[in-house]
């Protein structure tokens, strides 16, 4: 398998996840709990698939450095930090929101779920923007697998 395709796959999973979250939110607004549950579980599944591909790629292939002009590096890194903060927050909130639903604590689920969905629906487009900046507009620089960095190879 050509590992260069992994960022495209993981970014596609982000987009699919966000679509399912939006559809799930719409279903609960219409009072369709079962459809809401199905859509949100699909959204969570694609978010998990994204994370597994991303984490595996980071460990075994590495992170791609910004390949754009030096005068944009600071702006890119600030944007990346914003995206990572959103993604981490959405991931933690997502797990807690799902646990509330699975444990039938629906009042807490509803209260936190609104925030979780909004944060994820902001995370997804910022993830796509990072992808475009790293792989479309400014093809990335060097990568070094985390495992090599840890092992000193």
Image: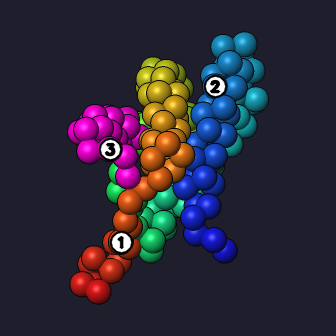
- Residue 80 is inside the magenta segment: yes
Tell me which corner region of the image, top left, top right, bottom left or bottom right, holds residue 43: top right
Disc 2 is placed on an element classified as helix
Residue 113 visible at all: no
Residues at badges 1 and 3 in contact (C-beta under 8 Å)? no
For marks 1 and 2, the one nearer the N-term is: 2
Q: Position of residue 96 (x, y in %)?
A: 43, 39
- Residue 20 is inside the magenta segment: no
**On the image, numbered disc 1 is attached to which residue?**
144
Distance from Cα at disc 1 to Cα at disc 3: 21 Å
Q: Position of residue 87 (x, y in %)?
A: 41, 40
Q: Nearer the viewer, mark 1 or mark 3?
A: 3
Residue at 62% across, 38% down:
15
Count every numbered label the image shows and give the total: 3
Q: Position of residue 71 (x, y in %)?
A: 25, 38
**Magenta residues?**
67-88
Question: In screen coordinates, is 124 left or right of 32?
Answer: left
Residue 39 visible at all: yes
**Looking at this view, is 62 or 91 the one in front?**
62
**On the image, numbered disc 3 is attached to which residue?**
69
Residue at 62% across, 61% down:
5
**On the image, numbered disc 2 is attached to which residue?**
22
For marks 1 and 3, the one nearer the N-term is: 3
Q: Residue furthest top?
A: 30
Q: Decide: is 150 above or below 32.
A: below
**Looking at this view, is 50 or 30 the one in front?**
50
């Amino acid at each position: 398998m050509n590992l260069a395709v992994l960022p495209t796959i993981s970014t596609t999973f982000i987009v699919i996840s966000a679509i399912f979250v939006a559809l799930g939110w719409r279903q609960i607004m219409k009072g369709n709990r079962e459809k809401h549950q199905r859509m949100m579980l699909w959204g969570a599944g694609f978010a998990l698939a994204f994370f597994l591909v991303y984490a595996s790629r980071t460990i075994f292939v590495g992170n791609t450095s910004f390949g754009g002009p030096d005068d944009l590096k600071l702006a890119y890194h600030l944007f990346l930090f914003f995206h990572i903060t959103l993604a981490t927050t959405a991931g933690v909130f997502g797990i807690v929101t799902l646990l509330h639903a699975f444990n039938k604590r629906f009042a807490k689920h509803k209260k936190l779920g609104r925030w979780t969905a909004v944060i994820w629906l902001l995370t997804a487009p910022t993830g796509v923007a990072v992808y475009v900046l790293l792989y479309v507009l400014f093809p990335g620089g060097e990568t070094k697998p985390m495992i090599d960095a840890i092992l000193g190879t």
